[in-house]
Image (spheres, rainbow, N blue to C red):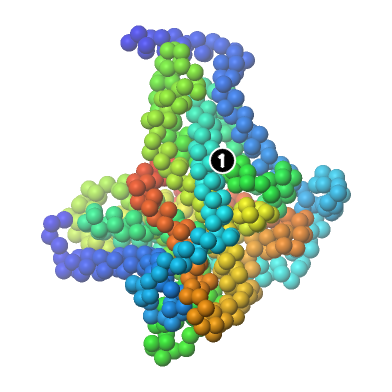
């Protein structure tokens, strides 16, 4: 491997250039929106703002946080993300613990009941009708209960628990510890990698879920931020030409536009993810690989 | 040692117990499972029963159970409707394009990353490439709108500089397929490469050294060692892709749909959503959903059978 031919050198150089370009293409769109969100909307419409704000302002963010739809929706998003993540992990851990005990009678059959639903489901409409029957379509709990468990997360957790020697549980039992104590004081403390993975997986899922809010939630004030962003997108699409045309024609009534406000909103939704994921990435990849290889 | 002895005795004891006793011993664990069984019934099995709506003439006041059976009428109606071929065609075209263009992207990316010597550079690129996976399609489509808009968007700016006119890129029919393919690669290729990269690390480096001694170059090494080494992983991922061929990326398509492209962007799932939730034709939409579900499962079983016979890769 020490001697490298000319061809190999050329390949290495090209590869490096290509991957750098790939990295740029991946990140630049985020940067572009970030720049747009700190530039006055009216100035942005003229074009030519690429790498740095030309007419710097915080007004887009101010207006976004003052918006009567955006602010309450952020509150919904934060609540469902926190509550949903904690409950989701708890439920997954409890189920995975019970079904990882090898001596449990009927374990295979019960697991199959859960597995079967990944193969076949009733479909979107019967699911919606059921949510409506349960009264969830006009409730905050729509975001918590229906999605509290996923088979994939369960497998991730169970795979992790199955690497813990059974003797550990048995000896703890002999020492008088019950299952609840074993789970919370022995199993979970040594499963931090998987817990971090699950927290990110579930948390990001909640934060990003716009579909539930858009199609299953009937109360506007209960819609999460992602759904409201989608609504703004749909409105902008519906009257694209008219609105922007008006905004340009109206002159300098306001310096922000519906577009620049949305850019700020996009960044408000993206920032928490950008901040969190590099820290958890290490665990995440590790957890994913364990889950996919053994699951 | 004493503990080990005790455990052994305990194990011995377990074997002699009757089933009833063993169930009683694990009562706490059943209590753990119980809430999730209730959940399973409420959110999975009852909707599954609700799918019988596809064979019924739904009357709101009678409910799903009370509504009269009408057999396969809704299915017949769907299959003979003019929308049928459009919707199936659109779904298969989009899925087909993704299978050909988007599926190989993460494999290629993993192979290229695997050739990088500098761990720091490799990790930086990897970390960057995961980011789009963590944001929702709503955010992605918003970003795309900002980039492609005729009002100050960077792409149209560049076009203007080149003396070309501004165009509505997101709102025209011709650009729909390219946008679908590229945004899919942009969002998912980096993240999907993880699985291939982890398969690549499992390949024994001695194989490459041996190949080098035998005079094999880099390309030959990739062809004869690397690709066979991740063949099983590619096979499994391909099976998943095949079995979800009728999905075609629901979120993405739903958000990229615009008045100009409705003809080519109506896929099965968006059609179900429109007829069911927007027009309230619950039983008809349920029938289409069931049709899709049954078709998908058959496809998965068939694909699995073929791959088991040919490349010895199986999901089960």
Task: Name the residue rendered at 55%, 59% in the picture.
Answer: A70
Please indicate whether residue B303 sits to the left or right of residue B117 in the image.
right
> Which element type, helix, strand or loop, lies under badge 1?
loop
Task: Name the residue rendered at 32%, 10% in the picture.
Answer: B1
Disc 1 marks which residue?
Answer: A149
Residue B209 appears in the rendering: yes
B279 or B241: nearer the eye? B279
B161 or A160: nearer the eye? B161
Q: Position of residue A150 (x, y in %)?
A: 55, 42
B289 or A247: nearer the eye? A247
Q: Residue furthest front?
A: A253
* B269 is higher (above) or lower (below) than A97: below
Please indicate whether residue A250 sits to the left or right of residue A175 in the image.
right
What is the chain letter for disc 1? A
Count neighbours of disc 1 (C-alpha within 10 A) and say few if under 14, some if 14 to 19, many if 20 or more: many
Q: Position of residue A71 (x, y in %)?
A: 54, 56
Q: Position of residue B243 (x, y in %)?
A: 56, 54
Task: Name the residue rendered at 57%, 41% in the picture.
Answer: A148
């Amino acid at each position: 491997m020490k001697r490298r031919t000319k061809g190999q050198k050329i390949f290495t150089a090209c590869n490096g250039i290509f991957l750098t370009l790939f990295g740029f293409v991946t990140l630049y769109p985020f940067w572009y929106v970030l720049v747009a969100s700190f530039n006055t909307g009216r100035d942005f419409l003229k074009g030519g703002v690429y790498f740095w704000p030309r007419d710097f302002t915080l007004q887009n963010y101010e207006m976004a946080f003052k918006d009567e739809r955006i602010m309450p929706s952020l509150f919904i998003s934060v609540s469902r993300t926190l509550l949903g993540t904690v409950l989701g992990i708890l439920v997954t851990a409890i189920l995975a613990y019970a079904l990882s005990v090898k001596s449990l009678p009927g374990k295979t059959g019960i697991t199959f009941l859960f597995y079967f639903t990944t193969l076949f489901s009733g479909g979107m409409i019967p699911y919606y009708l059921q949510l409506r029957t349960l009264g969830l379509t006009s409730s905050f709990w729509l975001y918590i209960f229906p999605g509290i468990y996923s088979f994939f997360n369960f497998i991730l957790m169970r795979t992790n628990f199955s690497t813990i020697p059974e003797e550990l549980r048995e000896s703890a039992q002999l020492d008088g510890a019950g299952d609840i104590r074993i789970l919370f004081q022995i199993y979970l403390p040594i499963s931090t990698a998987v817990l971090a993975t699950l927290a990110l997986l579930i948390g990001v899922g909640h934060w990003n879920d716009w579909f539930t809010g858009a199609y299953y939630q009937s109360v506007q004030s209960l819609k999460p931020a992602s759904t409201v962003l989608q609504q703004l997108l749909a409105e902008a699409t519906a009257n694209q030409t008219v609105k922007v045309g008006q905004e340009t024609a109206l002159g300098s009534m306001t310096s922000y536009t519906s577009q620049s406000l949305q850019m700020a909103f996009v960044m408000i939704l993206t920032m928490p993810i950008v901040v969190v994921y590099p820290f958890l990435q290490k665990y995440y990849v590790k957890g994913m690989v364990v889950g996919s290889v053994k699951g | 040692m004493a503990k080990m002895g005790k455990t052994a005795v305990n194990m011995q004891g377990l074997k002699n117990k009757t089933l009833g006793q063993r169930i009683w011993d694990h009562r706490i664990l059943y209590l753990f499972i119980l809430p999730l069984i209730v959940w399973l019934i409420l959110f999975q099995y009852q909707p599954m029963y609700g799918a019988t709506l596809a064979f019924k003439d739904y009357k709101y006041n009678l409910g799903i159970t009370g509504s009269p059976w009408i057999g396969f009428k809704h299915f017949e109606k769907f299959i003979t409707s003019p929308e049928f071929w459009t919707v199936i065609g659109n779904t298969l075209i989009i899925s087909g394009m993704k299978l050909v263009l988007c599926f190989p992207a993460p494999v290629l990316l993993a192979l290229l990353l695997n050739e990088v010597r500098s761990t720091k550079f490799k990790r930086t690129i990897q970390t960057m490439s995961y980011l789009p996976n963590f944001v929702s399609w709503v955010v992605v489509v918003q970003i795309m709108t900002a980039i492609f808009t005729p009002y100050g968007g960077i792409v149209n700016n560049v076009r203007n500089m080149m003396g070309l006119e501004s165009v509505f890129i997101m709102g025209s029919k011709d650009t729909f397929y390219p946008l679908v393919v590229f945004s899919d690669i942009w969002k998912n290729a980096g993240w999907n490469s993880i699985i291939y990269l982890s398969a690549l690390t499992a390949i024994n480096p001695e194989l490459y050294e041996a190949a080098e001694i035998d005079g094999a170059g880099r390309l030959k090494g990739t062809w004869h060692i690397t690709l066979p080494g991740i063949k099983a992983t590619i096979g499994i991922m391909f099976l998943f892709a095949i079995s979800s061929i009728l999905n075609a990326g629901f979120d993405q398509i739903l958000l990229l749909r615009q008045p100009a492209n409705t003809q080519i962007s109506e896929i099965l799932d968006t059609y179900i959503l429109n007829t069911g939730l927007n027009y309230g034709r619950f039983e008809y939409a349920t029938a289409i959903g069931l049709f899709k579900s049954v078709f998908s499962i058959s496809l998965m079983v068939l694909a699995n059978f073929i791959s088991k016979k040919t490349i010895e890769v199986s999901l089960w």
